[in-house]
Image (spheres, rainbow, N blue to C red):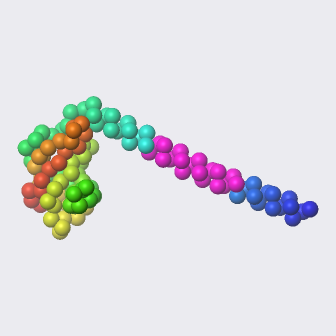
């Protein structure tokens, strides 16, 4: 009889731990999605801080693989995302580079630029 009570208590504790973990995990994803959606709406509502042809010095935040398979640097100008093409493989995250803005995406929420030189 005592073994059954202990097993029931352990099962209850394990269930509570798993349920708590699931709720935190799901809740965190929802919060991240809402945050991302809010930032996207805000980006659509504001004018880009750059114009086509602008040349800027920017820090590389990270790298991403474009759908074409090419590596693009991800940079930000006043929170505005700029994807930079033709970045040499010797450039690393954190490096400052010179870029030229080439185009905007359809919603003007990001831009594409080309690498000019190291900053």
Could you say which quadrant of the image residue 98 lies in?
Answer: bottom left
Residue 89 drawn at (x, y percent): 18, 67
Number of numbered discs:
0
* Left-right relation of 108 to 21: left
What residue is shown at x 9% (from left), y 59% (from top)? Answer: 117
What residue is shown at x 60% (from left), y 53% (from top)? Answer: 21
Is residue 81 among the parts visible in the rendering? yes
State the extent of the magenta-drawn residues as a range.
15-32
25 falls in the magenta region? yes
Compared to 101, does 10 lie above or below?
below
In this view, the residue in front, 58 or 65, is 65
Q: Main secondary structure of the magenta part?
A: helix
- Residue farthest to the right? 1
* Left-right relation of 70 to 9: left
Residue 78 drawn at (x, y percent): 23, 42
Q: Quadrant of the C terminus?
A: bottom left
Residue 36 drawn at (x, y percent): 38, 42
In this view, the residue in front, 118 or 82, is 82
- Residue farthest to the front? 68
86 falls in the magenta region? no
């Amino acid at each position: 009889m005592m073994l059954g009570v202990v097993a029931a208590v352990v099962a209850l504790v394990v269930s509570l731990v798993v349920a708590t973990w699931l709720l935190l995990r799901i809740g965190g994803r929802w919060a991240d999605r809402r945050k991302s959606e809010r930032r996207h709406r805000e980006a659509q509502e504001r004018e880009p801080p750059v114009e086509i042809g602008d040349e800027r010095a920017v820090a590389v935040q990270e790298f991403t693989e474009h759908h074409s398979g090419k590596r693009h640097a991800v940079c930000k100008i006043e929170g505005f995302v700029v994807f930079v093409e033709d970045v040499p493989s010797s450039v690393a995250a954190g490096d400052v580079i010179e870029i030229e803005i080439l185009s905007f995406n359809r919603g003007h929420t990001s831009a594409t630029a080309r690498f000019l030189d190291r900053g």
